[in-house]
Amino acid sequence: MVLSDKDKEGVKKLLEPVQRDVKILFFRDDSSRCQYCDVIEELLEDIHSVNEHVIYEVLDANSDKAKEYGIEGGPVLLFEERPNIRYRGIPSGHEFPAFLDDIVTIAKGSVDLNANAAKKIARIQEPLHVLIFVTPTCPYCPLAVRAAHHFAYANDKILAEMVEAIEWSDLADQYRVSAVPKIVVLDPETGNELLEWEGAVPEEVFADYLLHALEHKHGAHDHHH
């Protein structure tokens, strides 16, 4: 048991709006990076125990099913209904409420976005891959994760992944993560980095950055507006 009885009470309250099934797929990779895989499984079981609508399946991160989702190694959590909302590594500490927030959003079938941010996000017509590097002790990180996940909920062209920098240290090194939250925007077709920044920003600014990332992709001379 990962959650104390007191925690479970709190989780139960937060998940009260969840009145229909939300399925989480957990891809574990026992060859590497799996120091928390058992804890993640227990966490999912604890959540399920307070709300039976939250269901989960444990899969191998190197299976064909993982390849279908474009997953290379684990641990990765995603929502079957919204596979573009993902967690690489454990959503613990400050990230745990963001994870519950995602479950509620998917169950409700709607997301509350700032109106201006929503307009900007609607303009994204081509795929973007957003990595949000976090650590469980970082209080500002969930703001960035929530914004990115809300955007991904509103626009399925956006793949938004929380990346727990300690478990995924290889990725954190690759993208030179020295402070969190660090956001890296990639072109999923080429893997090229389009934009990166550090720190939590308001939803509207985050949306602007994603539009800037697309401008970078096409070169600044491409202005059609």
Image (cartoon, rainbow, N blue to C red):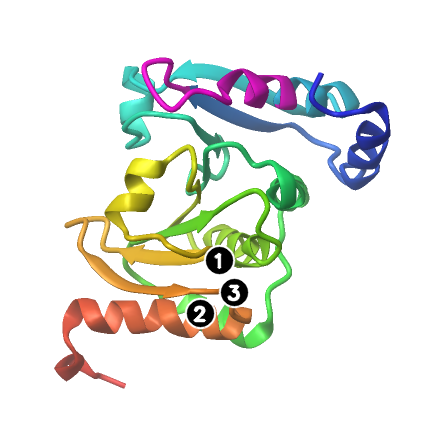
Rounded to the nearest whole Å, what is the CA distance between mark 2 and mark 1? 8 Å
Q: In terms of depth relative to the viewer, which is nearer, 127 or 59?
A: 59
* Label 2 crowd bin: few (<14), some (14–19), many (20+), radius 10 Å: many
Q: Quadrant of residue 34?
A: top left
Residue 110 horizontal/vertical position (percent): 63, 52
Could you tell me the amino acid type at mark 2? Ala
Q: Quadrant of residue 9?
A: top right
Q: Are marks 2 and 1 in contact (CB under 8 Å)?
A: yes
Q: Secondary structure at mark 2?
A: helix
Could you tell me the amino acid type at mark 3? Ala
Which part of the image, by quadrant, shows the N terminus?
Answer: top right
Rounded to the nearest whole Å, what is the CA distance between mark 3 and mark 1? 15 Å
Q: Secondary structure at mark 1?
A: helix
The residue that disc 3 covers is: 200
Picture residue at 33% right of the left edge, 30% below the top: 69
Q: In terms of depth relative to the viewer, which is nearer, 72 or 52?
A: 72
* Label 1 crowd bin: few (<14), some (14–19), many (20+), radius 10 Å: many
Residue 113 horizontal/vertical position (percent): 59, 64
Q: Quadrant of residue 141?
A: bottom right
**Is residue 184 placed above or below 70 in the rendered structure?**
below
**Is residue 22 placed above or below 114 in the rendered structure?**
above
The residue that disc 2 covers is: 207
If you read the primary sequence from the N terminus, does the residue marked by circle 3 or circle 1 appear first?
1
The residue that disc 1 covers is: 151
- Part of the protein shown in magenta: 28-43
